[in-house]
Image (spheres, rainbow, N blue to C red):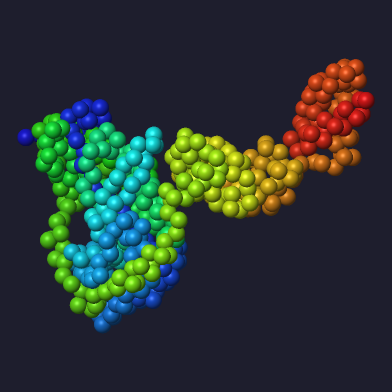
Amino acid sequence: MTSARVDDILDFDEVIAKYDPVMGLEVHVELSTETKMFCNSPTAFGAEPNTHVSPTCMGLPGALPVVNQQAVDWAIKIGLALNCKIAPYSRFARKNYFYPDQPKNYQISQYDEPIAFDGYLEFELADGTPFRVDIERAHMEEDTGKLTHIGGETGRINGATHSLLDINRAGVPLIEIVTKPIEGAGERAPEVARAYVTALRDVIRSLKVSDVNMAQGSMRADVNLSLRPVGTTEYGTRTETKNVNTLKSIETAVRYEMCRQAAVLEEGGEIRLETRHFLETTGTTAAGRPKETSADYRYFNDPDLAPVVVSRERVEEIRATLPELPWVRRARLQEEWKLSDEELRDLVNTGAIDLVADTVEAGAPSAEARNWWVSYLTQQANNRGVELEALPIIPRQVAEVISMVSEGKLTNKLARQVVDGVLDGEGDPADIVEKRGLAVVSDDSALRTAVEEALAAQPDVADKIRDGKVQAAGAIIGAVMKATRGQADAARVREIVIEICS
């Protein structure tokens, strides 16, 4: 029996004609609690390695875990927002495995008794097509530490000479949200995967329980995928692509795995049950290790932790704190901003709707806020190869620029320079205007001098204006704008030109 090389892929159209993809998505969300899941170590991102640690998260003998009540409440909150049932009784288990980033040699997680289960999430694809993903469970667990592999070309353990271990992240509260098998997506499977994670991120962000920063690993997805011949019902062997941490990469990983697995099957090979790594630079996946089953981990109830018991009264108290969920908010904003379905869809598809809403809340008119985020800033995000929300500019700063334009302090051209400065890390808009000297020149004496010089340089144009051909003033205005590096108040320049030539 032959097998395809890892880099052998089948054309996507051929894949769809012959095979039906089945997906399963496991999304890990770090909660923004001040302390860890089972100890009082801080969770703040970016600290010096191995400074946010305790005997408990380091797995030292005799250290006993204590459950973070805030994390439990937020797990319930996530479950309710995802239409899950909340278990009145759930337990923590020990997931036993050896890896250097888990000093205890087990991870505390929930196994067969999760806190939330049997939910769903409904969302729309880019063209407005509705889709529903059923959710198997949302369970609590602790994050592991972080390994940094040194010496290899890829940053992976293969080829590395040594590894550095940071325990700061070990013990940070996690919610793992696991879908039921996603079937029926067909050729839109890559798009469905991206849209689901996007919608999930929006929901969790609205709950204010996580910053869902995918670049920092606060939210990351494991992509399970298998293929089965069209017309059959038996699932194929799956692969699990681990820790995919951008929306674009999730879509790319699904598409690549579909094409790679199909190539293997077409050559008569067998798909290995394995974990795979997504390679950002190439948009491909690479083999990791053989995939374990649940039995291989030797789960058993953690003897140091009591069961989590949640009363119906407490569930309803938390339900009452749920905010306006994204789809409700979008319907409200569509009405308030007088948007068509297509305009709303553009905002959602570009990932701009929350950014625009926050910019409006910061004082900007909705039309101007939409224009900046959907056009210029989306273009900048594409140029930089990042998600729109990852741009180093926040809604308050965009609103400040919009205000400067409306007050006549900046022209649209100058405003773009200010925004570029913010994106380049030069500071807030007001600071950039001052440092670069970008403020509109509105002083009449300075403008009058510039106009007189432009009229003297173009006497024929001046004569035309004096003869009543006021449209010729455009040439003078252009000259003044050039002389002032685009910083003149064009409307005031026109008034001065007409005044002088009258």
**Location of residue 64 (image quadrant):** bottom left
Spot occupied by residue 44 in the image (x, y as percentages of width and height):
44, 66
Q: Quadrant of the N terminus?
A: top left
Q: Is residue 132 left or right of residue 355?
A: left
Q: Nearer the viewer, residue 445 or 281?
A: 445
Q: Is residue 9 above or below residue 138?
A: above
Q: Is residue 112 left or right of residue 115?
A: left
Q: Quadrant of the C terminus?
A: top right
**Location of residue 42 (image quadrant):** bottom left
**Location of residue 483 (image quadrant):** top right
Q: Nearer the viewer, residue 214 or 100?
A: 214
- Residue 483: in sight, yes or no? no
Extreme left residue here? 1
Q: Residue at x 15, y 37 (%)?
A: 228
Q: Is residue 483 above or below residue 425?
A: above
Q: Residue at x 36, y 51 (%)?
A: 200
Spot occupied by residue 431 in the image (x, y as percentages of width and height):
69, 52
Spot occupied by residue 76 in the image (x, y as percentages of width and height):
33, 65
Q: Residue at x 88, y 27 (%)?
A: 498
Q: Is residue 321 above or below residue 119?
A: below
Q: Is residue 73 left or right of residue 229?
A: right
Q: Nearer the viewer, residue 350 or 446?
A: 350
How many labels were placed on the picture?
0
